[in-house]
């Protein structure tokens, strides 16, 4: 028997001895036995609750006037100041100050994956990621739009927003800027 034939025979025997992949029922049983299924569901529910809380909190600021560089309800908000304030107040995460920095610090997701609490970005000033809002569901987002306007909910399916859509992002706890991050202070 040649060395090559032996390797082929050995490889064939190993392939036959390999266990069949586990099906989803086996995986669910394994996770349940380890207590991980319950934990996974708790984590999923916590994330959902936080997103809902974020959206509800943001809705409480409807009508607050736009102010360039603003980041409080007392002074008014610009778009990124509004997003940053909502995440800090509701979730305890400190995002970078500018919209483009927020886009860079978060996970890119497909528009079809949007969930309440995700960030939506637009090109409103002839540069990428120049505007940001918080997705609230059903194709709508809440944001602080422009001078002379107030925090409001708008439909992303309107032609103005469709033409300017730059992308969607998801915020994770590991992606927040630290309070002493110089970029977070801008």
Image (cartoon, grey):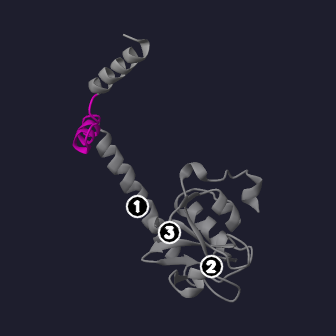
**Front one among 164 and 171:** 164
Mark 3 is surrounded, within 10 Å at the Cα level, by few (under 14), some (14 to 19) or many (20 or more) other residues, namely: some
- How many angstroms separate mark 2 from mark 3 (CA)? 13 Å
Residue 53 position in % (x across, y down) = 45, 66
Q: Is residue 175 magenta?
A: no
The vertical placement of 96 against 180, above or below, is: below
The C terminus lies in which quarter of the figure? bottom right
Give the residue displayed 27% in from the left and 40% down from the top. 27
Give SS at disc 2. helix
Label 3 element class? helix
* Image disc number at residue 111: 3
Give the magenta range: 19-34
Q: Secondary structure at mark 1?
A: helix
Whole-angstrom CA distance, mark 1 to mark 2, is: 30 Å
Quadrant assignment for the N terminus: top left
Quadrant location of residue 112? bottom left
Is residue 41 left or right of 170 when viewed as pictured?
A: left
Residue occupied by mark 1: 49
Residue 104 place in picture, x, y as percent: 66, 58
Task: Tell me: 79 left or right of 27.
Answer: right
């Amino acid at each position: 028997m040649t060395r090559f034939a032996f390797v082929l025979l050995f490889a064939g025997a190993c392939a036959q001895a390999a266990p069949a992949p586990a099906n989803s029922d086996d995986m669910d049983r394994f996770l349940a036995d380890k207590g991980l299924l319950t934990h996974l569901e708790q984590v999923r529910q916590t994330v959902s609750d936080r997103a809902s809380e974020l959206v509800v909190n943001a809705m409480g600021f409807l009508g607050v006037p736009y102010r360039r560089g603003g980041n409080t309800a007392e002074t008014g908000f610009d778009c990124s100041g509004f997003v940053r304030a909502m995440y800090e107040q509701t979730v305890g995460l400190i995002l970078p100050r500018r919209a483009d920095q927020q886009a860079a610090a978060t996970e890119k997701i497909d528009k079809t994956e949007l969930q309440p609490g995700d960030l939506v970005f637009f090109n409103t000033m002839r540069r990428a990621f120049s505007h940001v809002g918080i997705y609230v569901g059903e194709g709508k987002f809440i944001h602080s739009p422009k001078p002379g306007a107030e925090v409001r909910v708008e439909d992303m399916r309107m032609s103005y927003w469709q033409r300017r859509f730059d992308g969607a992002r998801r915020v994770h706890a590991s992606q927040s800027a630290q309070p002493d991050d110089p970029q977070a202070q801008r």
